[in-house]
Image (spheres, grey):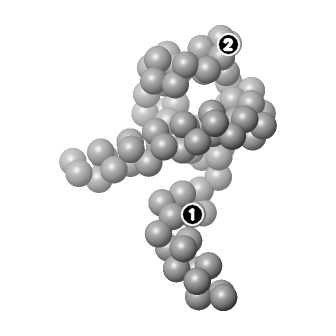
Amino acid sequence: MTNAINEHQANNPLHGMSLEKIVTDLVEHYGWEALGNRINIRCFTSEPSIKSSLKFLRKTDWARTKVENLYIATQKSLWKQ
C-alpha cells in the first residue's frame, strides 16, 4: 500500500508544494492584475493579498483547483524554455 501511495505522489506535480508557495509563485510571475485576469475571483481582483487568497482558496475547492491547474501549466511552460 505504501508503494502505491508513493508512486501516486511521484506523479503529482504539486507534491510537497504548499498552497501559500503556489499562490506566492503565481503572484511573483504574473502579478495580481494578470492573475485576476486569468482566474477571475475577488481575492485576486479586489484588494488582493496572500492571506485573503489563502483563506478563500482553502474553503473553495473549485477555485483552488483553478489555481493549482494554472500553476502546473505555468511550470510546464517555464520548463520548456
Q: Which residue is mark 2?
A: 47
Q: Splitting the image into 4 quarters, where does residue 45 fall? A: top right
> Where is residue 72 shown, x and y percent of the image?
44, 48
Does residue 51 appear in the picture of this structure? no
Is 23 rendered above or below residue 78?
above
The quarter in which the N terminus is drawn is bottom right
Q: Are marks 2 and 1 in contact (CB under 8 Å)?
A: no
Q: Nearer the viewer, residue 69 or 50?
A: 69
For this view, does 75 lie left or right of residue 50? left
Q: Categorize mark 1 by other alpha carbons within 10 Å: few (<14), some (14-19), many (20+).
A: few
**Callout 2, which amino acid?**
Glu
Question: Which residue is located at x 52 percent, y 79 percent?
Answer: 7
**Label 1 SS:** loop
**Callout 1, which amino acid?**
His
The disc at residue 15 is: 1
Q: Categorize mark 2 by other alpha carbons within 10 Å: few (<14), some (14-19), many (20+).
A: few
Q: Residue furthest top?
A: 46
Is 32 rendered above or below residue 59?
above
> Where is residue 38 shown, x and y percent of the image?
45, 24
